Image (tube, rainbow, N blue to C red):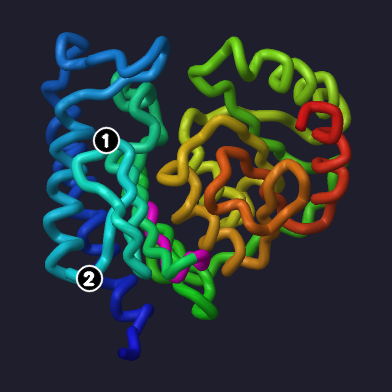
């Protein structure tokens, strides 16, 4: 059976925007009493869960034969060739504090290949998307990674909730890059960091201890925009891992070299 990934991407974008509208409406009267801790410093609310239900229901109708990998685990993956990877609200801590960005992230995979991805940033009403061999887009306009060198780069890093496991890596990243690149930023959303890189707003990004739902959609958007994504060892088979190095391609090896002692 032939699949039209461009057509599927358009349909997924509408689903992501629908979930984003729900998130935006709920943020108006949201309060901290609705927050539950999954782990220390890792939060979830009814908004995450209801957004996931909305997305899953719509995706099941769109592609009934596909399985699911989702952050809130409302459905399961049973070895299907096609499967959706869904983060119904990436940047939950940002959402809780009404601090942009936060987004909906949806990817479709076929075995070990990402075939389409869509990320909708709720606060700015920005829709990033890509499909295999189709290029990357923001609100209908083509996007491409930057051409800035390492010394001028805006580099994104994050501090995941698992502080004990990540502390050494975090210290090493700051020591390695602070004062050597143009600037370092953290925005609280892996999916958005990757999209910003794809659009040329950031030039490199590094994070570990993240789930597939955090990076899968952003990954194809970056690669279709001309960027490079690997794990910390430089391998391009990163889909089942929990670490990502992304760049505009001009200084990827420098990022990998700096990570050599923490892998």
Percent x, y for residue 227? 67, 61
Instruction: Count the numbered circles shown.
Output: 2
Please identify the dominant SS of the magenta region. strand
- Find the magenta span and give its range: 112-120
Q: Residue at x 26, y 39 (%)?
A: 73
Dot 2: few (<14), some (14–19), or many (≥20) neighbours within 10 Å?
Answer: few
Residue 118 lies in magenta, yes or no?
yes
- The residue positioned 58% from the left and 57% from the top of the image is 198
Which numbered tag is attached to residue 175? none
Residue on which the image places disc 2? 65
Cβ atoms at labels 1 and 2 below 8 Å apart? no
How packed mark 1 is, by other alpha carbons closer than 10 Å (few <14, some 14-19, many 20 or more), is: some
Residue under circle 1?
Answer: 72
Quarter of the image with the C terminus is top right
Up/down of 260 relative to 119, above or below: above
Who's the residue at 77% across and 58% down the image? 249
Quadrant of image for the N terminus = bottom left
Query: Residue reaching furthest front?
Result: 79
Q: Circle 1 — which element?
A: loop
Horizontal and vertical percent position of residue 174: 76, 21
Is 260 situated above or below 21?
Answer: above
160 over 67 or under it: above or below:
above
The residue drawn where x is 26% and y is 66% is 66
Q: Nearer the viewer, residue 156 or 170?
A: 170
On the picture, is 217 further left or further right than 149? Answer: left
Q: For residue 197: magenta?
A: no
The mark lying in front, picked from 1 and 2, is 2
Picture quadrant where residue 259 is located: top right
């Amino acid at each position: 059976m032939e699949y039209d990934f461009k057509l599927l991407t358009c349909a997924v974008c509408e689903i992501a925007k629908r979930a984003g509208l729900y998130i935006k409406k709920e943020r108006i009267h949201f309060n901290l009493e609705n927050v539950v801790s999954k782990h220390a410093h890792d939060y979830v609310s009814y908004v995450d869960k209801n957004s996931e239900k909305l997305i899953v229901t719509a995706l099941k109708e769109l592609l009934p034969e596909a399985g699911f990998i989702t952050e809130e685990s409302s459905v399961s993956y049973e070895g299907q060739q096609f499967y959706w990877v869904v983060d119904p609200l990436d940047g939950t801590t940002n959402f809780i504090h009404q601090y942009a960005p936060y987004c909906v992230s949806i990817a479709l995979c076929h075995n070990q290949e990402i075939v389409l991805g869509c990320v909708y940033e709720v606060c700015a009403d920005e829709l990033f998307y890509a499909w295999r061999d189709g290029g990357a887009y923001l609100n209908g306009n083509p996007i491409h990674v930057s051409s800035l060198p390492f010394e001028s780069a805006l580099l994104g890093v994050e501090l995941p909730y698992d502080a004990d496991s990540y502390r050494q890596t975090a210290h090493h990243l700051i020591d390695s890059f602070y004062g050597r690149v143009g600037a370092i930023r953290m925005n609280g959303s892996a999916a958005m960091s990757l999209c910003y890189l794809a659009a040329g707003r950031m030039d490199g990004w590094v994070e570990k201890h993240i789930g597939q739902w955090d990076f899968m959609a952003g990954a194809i958007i970056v690669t279709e925009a001309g960027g490079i994504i690997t794990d910390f060892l430089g391998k391009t088979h990163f889909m089942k891992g929990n670490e990502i190095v992304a760049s505009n391609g001009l200084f990827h090896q420098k990022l990998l070299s700096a990570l050599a002692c923490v892998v």
